[in-house]
Amino acid sequence: MLEKLEKEFHKDMVNIYSEADKQLGYKASHFKRMLSEQGGYKTAIKLVNQPKATDGFTTLWEYKRLDLSVEALVCRDKYRCLFDETIRQTCMNRLKDYGYNPVTSINKELELIEEIRILPMSQEEFDYIDIEGLQDTYFMGDLINHQDGTYHYRKVGIKAEKNVLFLFQYKNHIVASAVLYDTEKYDTPIDGEYYGAWKFDKDTIQVFKPITLSEIQAIDDSVQGFSQAKKIIDISYLEKIIELIEEKKRPDIPEEISLMESKGLKEGAKTQIVVNAYERNSIAREKCIAHYKTKDNGKVKCQVCGFCFEDFYGEEFKDKIHVHHIKPLAEIDDEYEVDPIKDLIPICPNCHYAIHSSKENDIFQLIKCKLGTAQ
């Protein structure tokens, strides 16, 4: 039994290498050599037991594809009996430290989801200027932070209780997804118009680059068009739907500034920026960026020097920016909860590097003054 499972694991290890190469253009040659020489199981044990995340892991984090990491593979339920709990817990902790919840990984969803539904969103009720505004303000903002994953519906709901993957349709695109865990009907309509609610697992709420009708039809050609009618996609296409969502996840600029303890840099040295958990928090980042976009005519700019990636590099680099955590870590206690508006601020990588480099030079003092007036 274990021998067969170990062979399956090795095959999946080869698959994650192939997918990283095919989807990201990332060729992990050292990883491939380890697989050839030691096999998948021993390679996983060796990589997981490293005192810190490997370069391969951090590269996948930069691509926002930790689902292709060895750690995510080890966490799959099918391999629970192959690894002891210490190894699995190490993997889970590392993934969570980098903002990835293994509980909501592709394979966990495959085990639980029983149905796929396309849910049209009324443009009268969700009157956002653009899709990205809806994604940032509603899905990553209100739905998670203020509504606890509860999505109110009007007179007609969907006969579903749990384990349904909802694909939210807005302006003829699929713009978000979430997994339903419960439904509720109201005896008396809320505000005279909401007759019930769907309750979504907040950890499963995702936004991504808009998915078109043709991309859905390439998976399930029975979907003839988007409309106000709620549609069902054949459950046999679940894996392909989730793969499409993963491919569509919006990239961020990787934040790679390290705290510089020495004033000099050796030529050719590899410098990284290590950001704290508050700066890595994807929801906080999204809310911070959305706030500052309203101040700069829909564009996100460095609040220190004014640089805008979109203006300089083009549409492809829209909304790409670092965020900096303003509140000193020494002032943070165990009950601290980040405020995306007061505690975070968008800045370009150059200014981020300068801030983290030296607290004694004139550049830092200048930036501190700018940050003080940027609110």
Image (cartoon, rainbow, N blue to C red):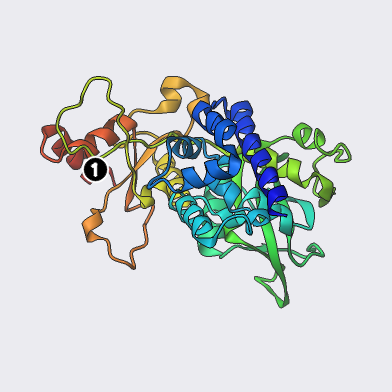
Left or right: residue 249 compared with residue 258: right
Q: Position of residue 324 (x, y in %)?
A: 32, 43
Q: Residues within 10 Å of mark 1 (few under 14, many from 20)?
A: some
Query: Residue at left 63%, top 30%?
Result: 18
**Which one is in front, 49 or 150?**
49
Residue 130 in sight here: no
Left or right: residue 67 compared with residue 292: right
Query: Residue at left 79%, top 64%?
Result: 160
The residue furthest right is 222
**Which one is in front, 20 or 236?**
20
Residue 67, quarter of the rendered image: top right
Residue 373, quarter of the rendered image: top left
Query: Pointer 1: what residue?
Result: 371
Q: Is residue 80 above or below residue 270?
A: below
Q: Position of residue 238 (x, y in %)?
A: 77, 47
Q: Is residue 346 above or below residue 86?
A: above
Query: Residue at left 63%, top 58%?
Result: 80
**Which one is in front, 293 or 335?**
335
The residue furthest bottom is 187
Query: Residue at left 41%, top 21%?
Result: 312
Q: Secondary structure at mark 1?
A: helix
Left or right: residue 274 compared with residue 125: left
* Mark 1 residue type: Leu
Q: Position of residue 9 (x, y in %)?
A: 65, 45
Q: How many marks?
A: 1
Residue 100 in sight here: yes
- Of the 4 image quadrants, the one containing the N terminus is bottom right
Left or right: residue 197 compared with residue 282: right
**Which one is in front, 162 or 70?**
70
Q: Position of residue 253 (x, y in %)?
A: 44, 33
